[in-house]
Amino acid sequence: MGETPQWVRIKAGDVFHIPPGAKHAFRNRARQPAVMIVISTSRQGRFFRDVGTPIAAGTPLVRPSDVCVEAAESYGHWNGTPEECADGLALSSM
């Protein structure tokens, strides 16, 4: 039986490591924007590029969460349900 997942608080200046294949999520509960410096593989870099690519003018609007879920699935990444992510992940609206 696996361990019960729990959120780990990371403060400004902290360094952390996520092992390959580990289920994980990020959330920012502060009112200020969060900034991360990510060091990763080129494949993971392509994933971040894909989810951060602006949509073309005239394209029907989609929810940011839909874009991220679709990209994550295409890369074989885990997508947690709100229940798996404790109280869910807040995503900014467009």
Image: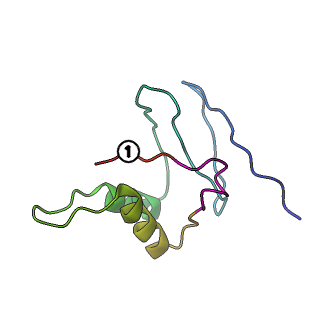
Residue 85 in the magenta stretch? The answer is yes
Q: Farthest residue in the left direction? A: 58
Residue 49 in the magenta stretch? The answer is no
Residue 56: which quarter of the image? bottom left
Which is nearer the eye, 72 or 17?
72
| Residue drawn at 64 percent across, 52 percent down | 85
* Tag 1: amino acid: Ser
| Residue drawn at 41 percent across, 58 percent down | 65
Residue 6: which quarter of the image? top right
* Part of the protein shown in magenta: 80-89
| Residue drawn at 84 percent across, 61 percent down | 2
Screen quadrant of the N terminus:
bottom right
Q: Is residue 9 left or right of residue 94?
A: right
Which is nearer the eye, 17 or 34?
34
Residue carrying label 1: 92
Q: Is residue 50 left or right of residue 40?
A: left
Label 1 residue SS: loop
